[in-house]
Image (spheres, grey):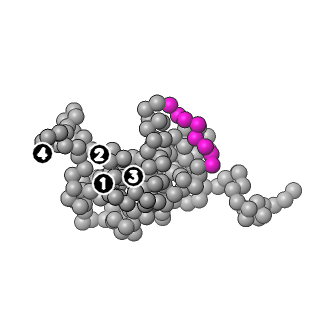
Amino acid sequence: MPRGLPYNVKQCLEKSRDSALLSVETYNKPAIKFRSGGYIVLMSIAWTSLFHAIFFKRKIKPFYRVKGSKNFEKKEGDYCYWELKTCVKEYFGSDTANPIRKNLEFFIPLRNKIEHKSLPEIDPDLFAEYQALLLNYDKILEKEFGLNYCIRESLSFPLQLFPSSKNLSENQIKP
């Protein structure tokens, strides 16, 4: 990780990037049945930590305040950080039509169901939304911290047995 950023920003960025890379690794493992759930939960952590890094960089403390006080809430001795929904609201403000915001808001209820209730039936046709979540992540990472922090160079296209495009099936060897 390049130098120059405050320690708390670096910590959040490291957690964020590791979570994003783990989400892709989990999703791309062929025998994992919890791949969509794991991907969504880990990408939620990646996004939340990315937002925390951004807020710290901007000298904004992403903690909840005690109602009616200037003090920050604590639980078990640690500050209560904003969760993803609050981070999205704070980052995008009144821009409710932003496509990156919309993509994140699509995943927040899914993540909540996965973590707190049960694993819902997740449509396999959501691949485009999964891909957008990752591409948007790297786009914001680059916008806020520069190209050196992006994860795109660490990722490759997974090999698949299921043809996903016309071009792929046209280039297959036919029996």
What's drawn in magenta, residue-wise?
118-125
Whether residue 57 appears in magenta in the rendering, the answer is: no
Q: Are marks 1 and 3 in contact (CB under 8 Å)?
A: no
Q: Nearer the viewer, residue 84 or 163?
A: 84
- Looking at the image, tell me whether mark 1 or mark 3 is earlier in sequence order: 3
Disc 1 designates what residue?
90
* Tag nearer the camera, 3 or 2: 2
Q: Do the residues labelled 1 and 2 touch (CB within 8 Å)?
A: yes
Check disc 3 and give the amino acid type.
Answer: Trp
Residue at 61% x, 43% y: name it: 123
Q: Disc 1 to disc 2, how far (Cα)?
A: 10 Å
Disc 4 designates what residue?
70
Prevailing secondary structure of the magenta residues? loop
Q: How crowded is mark 3: few (under 14 residues within 10 Å), some or many (20 or more)?
A: many
Whether residue 122 appears in magenta in the rendering, the answer is: yes
Q: Disc 3 to disc 2, how far (Cα)?
A: 12 Å
- Looking at the image, tell me whether mark 4 or mark 2 is earlier in sequence order: 4
Residue at 25% x, 50% y: name it: 62
* Extreme residue in the bottom direction: 147
Residue at 34% x, 52% y: name it: 89
Q: Position of residue 96 (x, y in %)?
A: 40, 57
Q: How crowded is mark 4: few (under 14 residues within 10 Å), some or many (20 or more)?
A: few
Q: Disc 1 to disc 3, how far (Cα)?
A: 13 Å
Looking at the image, is 106 positioned above or below residue 172?
above
Looking at the image, is 40 positioned above or below residue 132?
above
Q: In which quarter of the image is the C terminus?
A: bottom right
- Looking at the image, tell me whether mark 4 or mark 3 is earlier in sequence order: 3
- Looking at the image, tell me whether mark 3 or mark 2 is earlier in sequence order: 3
